[in-house]
Amino acid sequence: MTRGALLLSGALALPLLLAACAEEAAAPAAPEGAEVAPAEDSAEQVVLLEPGLGTLGPGDDWEPSLMGTLSGTIEAVPVMYQTWDFSVGAFDASAQFRSYPNLHLNIGAYPEGIWDDPANTLVIRADLASLSAGRTGPATVTLNGENFGEPLLTVPAEVEILSLTRGAPGSDYGTAYGDLTASVSAPDFCPSLGTPPCSGGLQLTVETRVQYDVP
């Protein structure tokens, strides 16, 4: 289930919750002198969701699981981004190998500690000839504005896969997950709108779990 589907399911559940509350409020009071059984402990428990390992805590405050980091510099300023796994019943990780429309690596990177706001997120996409280490095919880095799909800046990039692993069949998550390290370079990435290469552009090291949405 994607993030959008998760929000929709919560909206559909609200009328049912209100109806249940109304029924409870309308229940007749116990006769005077009757014994009333003590209420059961309704303390909420943290629920582990698979395959993304997100959690539901008190109040059903869902949080995705942290996958990894992208660290380095943008215009010579140190930066840190994070990747997250939003999967709940369907693949929805922000670091994925995908097979459609062609084999490629897609990384959505969020500013450190902010997983629920698309503003200022990075999207790195690199075409692949195969799932192996080495320099990728054509690649881009995009800086998002306030919303996904509203890019402020997209520039060519060089992406090199330094190492990658994939789970074995029969392991906890089978072949759906693995680990990835990579380097990303984009000399023309200038969010300040300066003249490229603007003090080094973007230089990042990727260290993250990765989801394999491929056969």
Image (spheres, rainbow, N blue to C red):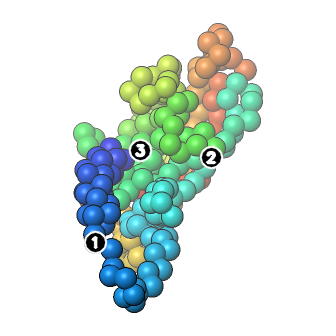
| Dot 3 or dot 2, earlier in sequence | 3
Query: Hey, which residue is sitting farthest front in the picture?
Result: 32
The residue depicted at 37 percent of the width and 88 percent of the height is 34
Q: Left of 153 or right of it: where is 173?
A: left
Q: From this view, report whether residue 29 is shown above or below residue 209.
A: below
The residue depicted at 30 percent of the width and 47 percent of the height is 11
- For badge 2, the amino acid type reads Gly
The residue carrying pointer 2 sits among few (fewer than 14), some (14 to 19) or many (20 or more) residues within 10 Å by Cα, namely few
Decide if residue 134 is in sight here: yes
Instruction: State the mark number for residue 113.
Output: 2
| Dot 2 or dot 1, earlier in sequence | 1
SS type, badge 3: strand
Q: Which residue is mark 3?
A: 105
Given residues 63 and 213, the one toward you in this image is: 63
- For badge 3, the amino acid type reads Leu
The residue depicted at 59 percent of the width and 22 percent of the height is 189
Q: From this view, report whether residue 204 is shown above or below residue 143.
A: below
The residue depicted at 28 percent of the width and 72 percent of the height is 28
In this rendering, which labeled residue sits more in front, label 1 or label 3? 1
Given residues 90 and 9, the one toward you in this image is: 9
